[in-house]
Image (cartoon, rainbow, N blue to C red):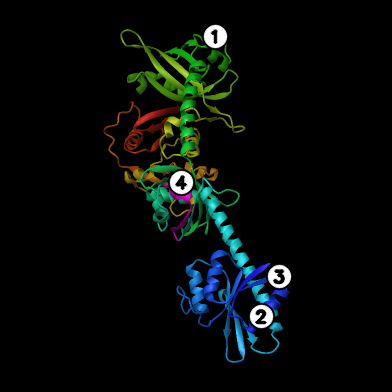
Amino acid sequence: MISVLFVDDNTDLFAQIRTFLEKTGEIRVEQAHSIKQAAEKLKGRTFDIIVSYEQMPDVNGIEFVPDMNGIEFLKYLKTQGNTTPVILLGRRGTGRLSLEEVNNATELALPKTGDIRPQLFEMVTMIKQTMLRKKGERELKVQNEQLATILSATPLGIFQVRGGIIDWVNRPFFTLLGYGESTLIGKELRALFKTPDEYEQVCREFLVRKDAAGLGHSDCRLAKADGTLVPCHLQVRPLDPRDIPRGGTFVVTDNSEKQKIADALKESEARYREVLANTQSIIIRMDTHGTITFFNRYALTFFDYASEDVIGKNVVGTIVPQKSRVQHDLSMMANDIGFNAEGFAVNVNENVRRNGDRVWIAWINKAIRDEQGRLVEILCIGNDITDRKRSGEVRISTDTWKDMVIGDTDIHEDVFDAVFHICTEISIEGREGKPVGTTFLIGDTKNVLEKSRQIILNPFEGHKPELRVVTNPQLSENIKALAQLDGAFVITGDGFVESVGRYITVDSSNVSLPPGMGTRHNSVAALTQVTKAVGIVVSQSGGGITVFRNGQILKKITL
């Protein structure tokens, strides 16, 4: 039932209209003899529609709404927050009246005399249409309020960007960053990041990391109002996939707790690996010539030997292949930095089991000296780091040691693995049968570029971002071909090949490396000493791979 409040001073026209409307069975009409009376009725109840004259006769006793006509009545309703639809009945000359639905500017002409039933049918239609529109507006308002409630209740931060400017945020997002809603709206998208480089890195990552639904993804750190950083995962539905700053809808997941759990897990895994290394490690002792003096039980089981088969034998020909380059390293081991300084060295070597299977072992080699300080034996503690995940291919796994290399850097694990395995391929294969030496600098790209200069035209300049990502398998051969050029590769922590052919300009006079390491090793050690980059050097004169961080050698791999 539609309730109508008819504001009229008992005219004959009102009686006709009221009788007709109520006979429809869908409309109930209540009369107010004056606007004052109408205002009083509206205080105690609501109506679906109000019908009023544009001009009302003067009514005595009106104090708070003196001389109010239909238009002024509308203004009064708005000041009271009343949104009831209003139809005004107005005089249009001497022989015609007009019904106007104010909200939608709909007008219906009524003859002042004669049969008005056709127009009254139209009036019923007008009232119903008005009700339907009002109902739709109410439903839309309810839906918007529900959506706003949902967006505020979700733990996910959500914001929208137009033209690089934030124009809408939900409560969880501005709460996450410690802003007020009004202070965050109107900021540039790039203002959420600590540096322009981080902002550009995230935009590149959105182009590369896309899911099946076309959403771009990025793991990053957003700047809070107090300047601190919060680890987040971003998803974006961009307006233009090729132009992220243009705008779109962003969904933010707070990764703070996830990061804490990951850090705790890494610490737990590190302790676990330490225990594992102490209980299930290959332990060998040999003299300075490589003659085996001790094999523990795990080593015998791993290499499939009996004790009498290896004790007194040389490591070359047993666990080291006869033609391996590691022979030279074994005979010269006493000259290694580990034995001249802290008493131990770390190397990754290719070894062989009794049945001929190739394996990669990470060795911690500790010098054993007599009372006079002379080196008499070498204690070797090894762990199998062979990656057998790829069918038909044996590679060095980095799972047990890469955490100490890339921890607390901006380098992604898959990026480090991709660069490292390219280095192993360069070391083993060279290029066209000739040995190749090269350098890779990963992470902290801005500082690396500031402390180096371009010495050749950058071969990657101008190429599409997705074609410059080192984790792309199709890029591997191009990188190996370019490794013959002078200078270093500079690769961002998320895998973007920034440049090729960079000459390091850092002073290396304060670097102390073992004998046999040349200018390339010294300059990389010096650069990692003053940046958070990780350096990997492939030696041309032996194929060894050396991993640097903080000016120190973290890993030596002999292939």
Badge nearest the viewer, 4 or 2: 2
Q: Is disc 4 in contact with disc 2, using a CB cutoff of under 8 Å?
A: no
In the picture of the structure, the residue carrying the numbered disc 4 is 496
Residue 536 placement (x, y as % from top left): 41, 35
In the picture of the structure, the residue carrying the numbered disc 3 is 26
Query: Measured along the vertical axis of the image, is residue 277 above or below residue 425?
Result: above
Dot placed on the residue nearer the N-terminal end, 4 or 2 = 2
Q: Is mark 2 on a helix, strand or loop?
A: helix
Query: Measured along the vertical axis of the image, is residue 268 above or below residue 135?
Result: above
Residue 376 placement (x, y as % from top left): 38, 11
Work out which quarter of the rendered image holds the N terminus and state it. bottom right
168 or 448: nearer the eye? 168
Point out the residue furthest to the bottom here. 94
What is the three-letter code of the residue carrying label 2? Ala
What separation in Å lies between label 3 and label 4 (alpha carbons)? 70 Å
What separation in Å lies between label 4 and label 2 (alpha carbons)? 82 Å
What separation in Å lies between label 1 and label 3 (alpha carbons)? 103 Å
Q: Which mark is residue 307?
A: 1
Q: Residue 511 carries which label?
A: none
Badge nearest the viewer, 3 or 2: 2
Q: Residues within 10 Å of mark 4 (few under 14, many from 20)?
A: many
